Amino acid sequence: MRNVLFVAFLVFIIAGCASQGGKSADIEQRDLFDQQQAQRQQEAARKQEADKQSQVMKEQEELKRQLEEQQKRQAQAQQQEQPIVRPLPGGTVGESQLKSDPWAQLKETGNLLAKRNIYYEYDHYDIKEEYVPIIEAHAKFLMAHPDLKIIVQGNCDDRGSREYNLALGQRRADSVKRAMVLLGVNEKQIETVSFGAEKPVAFGQDEESWAKNRRSDIVYPKEPQ
Amino acid sequence: MNLTDVRPDKRFRDFLALAGLLFCLTCVREASAQLTIEIIGGGANQIPVTILPFAGEESFVQRTSQIVAADLQRSGMFRLGSVGSVRPFPTEPSEINYRYWKNEGAEALVIGSVIEKADGHAEVRFRMMDVGKQSQILGFSYTVTVSQLRVTAHKIADLIYEKLTGDVGVFATKICFVTKNADRFELQVADADGYNPDFILAHKEPIISPQWSPDGTRIAYVSFERRKPIVFVHNLLDGTRMVLANFEGSNSAPAWSPDGRKLAVVLTKEGSSNIYTINADGSGLGRLTNTQSIDTEPNFSRDGRHILFTSDRAGSPQIYRMRADGEGEAERLTFEGSYNVTPRHSPDGKSFIFIHRNEGRFNVAAVDLATRQMQILTAGSFDQSPTFAPNGKMILYASEVKGRGILAAVSSDGRIKQRFTAQSGDIREPAWGPLLNNRRKE
C-alpha cells in the first residue's frame, strides 16, 4: 500500500509541474494578443489542464491496480515457498510432516523426531541397531526441510583420557553425520562437535551413569525451546 | 554478562622482573582455595636432616624454617631430626655444640636467621653444617622483600635437597590445574606445594589440557567457551591471550616443542583427529599424521627429535612414537592391555609415563625405553593426566576420591605418594611448570 501511495504522489508532482509550465508560457504571451484571444487561450488552457488531470487520475488508478495485482501474486508465491510436503511411506514421520510447522513435528510425543540421543558401548562409536530408526527419522526430516540445520554433539564417559575422549566424541558425532549423509541428507545441513567427557548428564561413577554419558546429541539450534 | 574472566597473574610479573636479580615471585595473598597435602607413603632410605627454627623468623607470617622442613618432608626422601632442648637455638656456626647434636642423632644441621631490614625487606641467612665433620656444607644469605620469604624458603629447600640427594630440587617451581566448582571452571596457577593458588581464567564452560611453555611465561590450553574446543595461548606476564587454533571441527591437545617456538595440536578439520604443528604465533600450520584413525595427545621429547602420541590405528588406543617431522613409520610402544593413553616423556628421555587400563582401573604406568618394561605406579580407580616434575622425580596426576576430583603425586619409583585436596569442588588437569634457573650463590 505504501508503494502505491508513493507512486501516486510522484505522479501528482509531475502533473503539477507540467500544468505550471503551461501557465508560465501563458503569461509570456499575454502582451502580444488581444483580450479575446487571451480569454480563448485561457479557456483552452483550462480545458487542456482538466483533460490532463483526468488522464493522470486514470493513470494513477491503473498503476494502483497493477501494484495490487503484483502484491497478490507475490503473496501467492510466498505461500508456495512454504516447506514442500512430501508424504513418506510408513511410520509416523511422513504423516506428521503433512503439518506445516516443522518445530511442532520435532516435539510431538511419540514421534521419533522427539528422540535426540544416540548411546554407545564403551570405547565404541558404531551406531547400535536400536538407534538406526532415530537417525533415519531425522535424516528424512532434514531432507524434507533443506533449510534446517543440526549440530551433532559427541560425548563420552569421563574415564581414561580427556583428550582421547574428545577425539572419540568427535568420532561419535561424525558417525551420525556419515549415516545421515548416506541416507541422502546434504552434508552442509550437519555440523559436528565434540564435548569429550566435559558435558556429562549423569555424575555417578557407575555403569548406569557412564552409559548415559556415552552419547551423541542431535541439536536443532533454531528450535524454539 | 561476560563470563570469561581473564587476568594477569601479578605474582608472575613480579617473578619475571626479579628473576634476574635474586629470584622469584609471590606476594602474600588471601588464600582462598588452599590445597591440603597429605603424604601417604615414604622412601625406603630416608636421609636424616635436622632443621632448627631460624632466629627472628617468628616476626613474619611465613616462617622460613617451617616451610623448608615441610618441603623436605613432603618429598618423602628425608627424615626430620629432633630440634633438641637447647635454647636459644644456634644461628651461627660458633654457637653450635656439636657433641650435643651428635648425641641427638643429627647429621646435617640447618641453622639460620631472618633479620628485618628497611623498606619491607628482610635478610635470610642459613647454613647447613656437617655435625660429624664440624664443617659447613652450605651457606647462603638473601636480601628479599617480605613477600618473597616463602619462595626464599623453597629455594633453601631446593639447595638442601640438591646437596643431600644429588638431584635438582623443584620446591620453587609452579604448577597449574583446573578447578570446577558448581558451574565455574578456573585455570589456576599455584606454587608447587599448592600454596598461593590464583586463577588466570574463569568460565562456565570447561577448560582442559593446560601445558606450560618451556620458559614458564605462557600456558596453552583448550577452552570450550565458544561451544567447541579451541586452543588458546595465555601470556602469564600481561594476562593477554591469543587463539592458537580455531579451525573447523575440534582443536585440542596442545604440546610445546622444547624451544617454545611451535606447538603440536590435534585438529579434525580434515576428518579424523590428526596431529599438526603450528608456530606459537598461530602461523605456519603443517600436518604430521595423515590417518583415518584417532591420533592425539602429542608430547615432544626434551631433545625435540621425537613425538609420543596416542593412536587407535591398531584397533585400541596405544602409545606410538614418531619423528618430530612426521617422516617415516610410527613405532608402537605399548602392547599390554587394550587401553594405553596420555604419553609423557620423562625429562631425561629414558622412559615415558602414560595411563594404562588394568582390569577396569585406570592407573599411571611407566615404560623404560631401553628394556620396554612396564611398571604400574598408582593404585587409584580413575587416574588421569600425569605430568612430570621438571627433575623427573615426581609425577603429579589427577585422581578421584569418593567421586571428587583430587590431585595426587607419586615418585617415579612408585614409593612416595602425596595427595592434594581442595577445600571444595573438583581439581583436575594438572601440569607441572618448568625449572627456572635463577639462583645465585653467596
Image (cartoon, coloured by chain):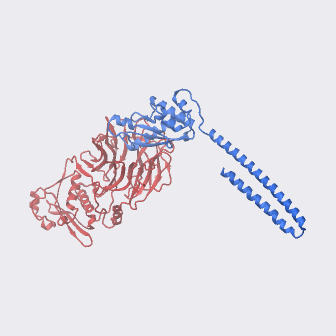
Chain colours: A blue, B red
Residue A196 x, y percent position in the rendering: 41, 42
Q: Residue furthest bottom?
A: B118
Relative vertical location of residue A27 with respect to residue B80 in this rendering, above or below: below
Residue B46 x, y percent position in the rendering: 19, 50
Depth check, front residue: A9 or A149: A9
Evaluate whether residue B335 shows in this view. no
Relative vertical location of residue A118 with respect to residue B2 in this rendering, above or below: above
* Residue B247 appears left or right of B177: right
Residue B437 x, y percent position in the rendering: 32, 61
State which quadrant residue B401 falls in.
Answer: top left
Residue B239 x, y percent position in the rendering: 40, 60
Depth check, front residue: A92 or B248: A92
Relative vertical location of residue B101 with respect to residue A58 in this rendering, above or below: below
Q: Residue furthest top?
A: A90
Depth check, front residue: B96 or A211: A211
Depth check, front residue: B173 or A129: A129
Relative vertical location of residue B19 with respect to residue A119 in this rendering, above or below: below
Evaluate whether residue B385 shows in this view. yes
